[in-house]
Amino acid sequence: MPASQRTEGGACARVPRAPAPTNDEARHRDDDVLNEPTMQKLLQLRLTAFASAWAEQQKNPEVNKLSFDERIGLLVDAEHLARENARIARCLRDAKLRMSSACVEDIDYPQKRELDKVVIRQLASCRWIAEHQNILITGATGTGKTYVACAFAQQACRKGHRAIYRRMPRLFEELTLAHADGTYARLLARLAKVDVLVLDDWGLAPPNDRERRDLLEIIDDRHGNRSTIITSQLDPKLWHDQLGDPTIADAVCDRLLHNAHRLVLKGPSRRKEEPAAKK
């Protein structure tokens, strides 16, 4: 742009120049240019949270007071937290918990329920998963068995384990379809590999011969290798008779009961309580 322009009378009028950028502005502009390739590389490496946190650091002058190691530590923490949250969300999505919001911190302990807080805290450590033990949750209908089971499964996901939830009637339907379409072996392999398998509503009805054999295959594959959570209205003493076939019942009960933690929920049905009450 010319420094001056001629007016109608022929005189030259001075045009004001734009102010020169300050040293800080020029430095920041140069930094943006130099940092752009690095930012693109971070995004190519899928370090999205790292890149976002780095961009925020560049906007905050207070960050300059930190050492290089401290700044790198904050960036690594941001990326680690983002990946951990994504992993937990993915595990919970794959688990398909009936009560996805259930968590051990929200389990309550009214006197009528006779639920030991110390035992729940010990199980919340998930050591039982590392030791391939089971959890059996029994009680009358409406006492919160499903909620407690889903809370343990959610805690397992938070601790880095994988979980799958199935109601027993739906599981038997899934197994029947797998027999029909040739995916039975694949389904058994999937159920065998998951760290925590939640089987809800165990023993609602006596299983038929195929269902008994399928159940034995699942329990046998998992015995000593993975952990299982079972909820049932039936006392474990009645499971043998409910399964029907004595030979299969012996095998299933022996594999489930001998290394299991047992929780018995008592009290009135919680479905009759206020909707805002905790499970």
Image: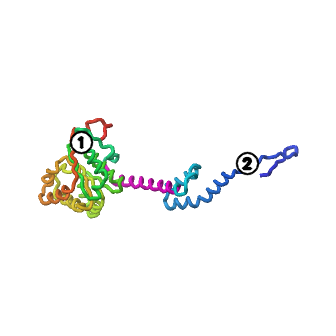
Residue at the spot of label 2:
19
Rendered residue at 72%/50% (across/down): 20
Residue 221 position, x and y percent, is 24, 62
SS at circle 1 = loop
Observer able to see residue 48: no
Q: Quadrant of residue 175?
A: bottom left
Rendered residue at 35%/46% (across/down): 101
Considering only order in the chain, which callout, 2 or 1, is on the residue closer to the N terminus? Answer: 2
Residue 79 position, x and y percent, is 47, 56
Label drawn at residue 143: 1
Please state which of residues 183 and 167 is positioned toward the viewer in this rendering: 167
Rendered residue at 83%/45% (across/down): 13
Please state which of residues 267 and 72 is positioned toward the viewer in this rendering: 72
Q: Mark 1 belongs to which amino acid? A: Thr
Crowding at dot 2, Cα within 10 Å, few <14 / some 14-19 / many 20+, comes out as: few
Residue 248 position, x and y percent, is 15, 59
Q: CA distance from mark 1 to mark 2?
A: 74 Å
Crowding at dot 1, Cα within 10 Å, few <14 / some 14-19 / many 20+, comes out as: many
| Magenta range | 71-97
Rendered residue at 24%/42% (across/down): 143
Q: Is residue 57 left or right of residue 136?
A: right
